[in-house]
Amino acid sequence: MRNIKLKLVYGPFLLLAVFFFSITQSAPASAAPEKQTNLIQNPGFEEPYNGGTAQSWSPWHQGLNDNPKPAKCSDRYLVEPTWSPELASAGLIRDGARSQHVGNSFDTWRAGVMQTISVNPGSTYRFTFYSTGRATNDQYPAPSDASVNLGVRGGIDPNGSGLWNDSDVVWGAAGSPHMSGSQGNWQQFSVEATATGSQITVFVQGDNGGTNQCRKHLDVWFDSAQVVEVGPPPTNTPPPPPPPPPQPVATNTPVPPTATATPEVSPTNTPVPSPTPTDTPVPPETGAICANAFADANLNGQRDPDEGFMAGVSFTVAQEDVVFGPGVSTGTDIPVCFENLEEGAYLVAQEVPRGLVMTTAQSATVQVNAGSTVTLEFGSWFRSESDEEIAALTPTAEGGDSSPSDSSSGDDGVNILAIVGLGAILIAIVLLAVLIIILVRQSGNSAT
């Protein structure tokens, strides 16, 4: 009897335990999300370093070292900074034992490091990294001057050319992660792009160039980089075939004996498939200037169909204090081109070698627009030594040396033609006097 009571008391609890156990065993556990693979080599910018940059990374910078520095940092200018591993730990290293440092003292710069990686064509990739920086005239750990634009951002070249100034580089949003003291103000930066080939190039950048941006300390640090695939290439899935038209239902309708007209079937409009949207190519953000020199034989200042090209003429292109060139003409129809120029006004100037004389203006100002090329032709004339001698012997409008062949007149000589004419007049007078004497004598003899 006691066993029966125990079964009645504990039986329901045993059934509930078995029920819950079966549920937990039969219900599949939710799978943990798969961790994305980081494609970056040496994402923490760790040792070893080569020339100041971490292994697997390469330095890049935009430099205008040939231009004079503006007084008191009154205009934008850029010089090459220095790259070095960060060894300190107080706020300057986010993860690991090192971080990548780029900086300079007083001279502003635009630079960073880059890496080219293999990817799947057509896939979309996200590049992220962390950065912090200081711009101040005071020693560490003084807070950074928040009025200075650090210009930190990331970029992806979808074709992996490894050129920071390639026109198709996709740049992310820029920011200024200023440190407030010894604690690093590490901020994350991100950019996405779709690969057009089998590799992409990623860039980290700091850009503090600009008016009144000069400080004794202009430093930026980079750490914790990552590249992951966020979207596979699109697949061309064919649309499902349209459903077959409904079959007509047969009915046993009696047909009257009289003839009936067969109804005409109205034509139906077959729907035209909508065009598949395609990516519209984005025009490049830069333009170009091409210049050439021609031999202006008729000195009219323009190239005629029968006039060729002139070699040895140098061209330069300038915008404010930025100068491109020089480029030298080759004497062919292939011009000297200056590419990857940002939109704006540019001064194009020519310089001719000794012996050439310009027949057009020495310089011209042109406007460059994105995706366009401005073409200029400068004329010049080759002046030989014989041309100079002839010009020296030609009388001027105010008088000058006579031609050596002119011997018909002179201030000191005797005019021969005048003497001959005077002699002829005297002979005529003598002959006339002789004739008068003879006539007078004949008339006197006849009178006697």
Image (cartoon, helix red, strand yellow):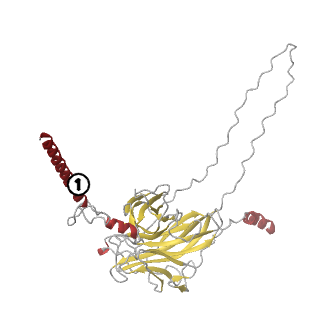
* Of residues 242 and 342, the one drawn nearer to the viewer in this rendering: 342
How crowded is the residue under tag 1: few (<14 C-alpha within 10 Å), some, or many (20+)? few
* Of residues 299 and 198, the one drawn nearer to the viewer in this rendering: 299
Residue 440 x %, y % = 14, 45
Q: Amino acid at mark 1?
A: Ala
* Of residues 167 and 85, the one drawn nearer to the viewer in this rendering: 167
Q: Is residue 203 left or right of residue 6?
A: left
Residue 368 falls in image quadrant = bottom left
Q: Is residue 38 visible?
A: no
| Residue bearing the label numbered 1 | 424
The outermost residue toward the top is 258
Residue 397 x %, y % = 26, 59
Image quarter (top left, top right, bottom left or bottom right) of the C terminus = top left
Q: Is residue 342 left or right of residue 224?
A: left
Q: Is residue 122 left or right of residue 166?
A: right
Where 74 falls versus 44 (above or below)?
above
Where 75 falls versus 376 (above or below)?
below
Q: Is residue 11 left or right of residue 55?
A: right
Q: Is residue 116 visible?
A: yes
Where 416 falls versus 147 (above or below)?
above
Q: Secondary structure at mark 1?
A: helix
Q: In the image, what residue occupies the spot 56% across and 86% down? A: 48
Residue 249 x %, y % = 83, 29
Image quarter (top left, top right, bottom left or bottom right) of the N terminus = bottom right
Residue 78 falls in image quadrant = bottom left
* Of residues 267 and 20, the one drawn nearer to the viewer in this rendering: 267
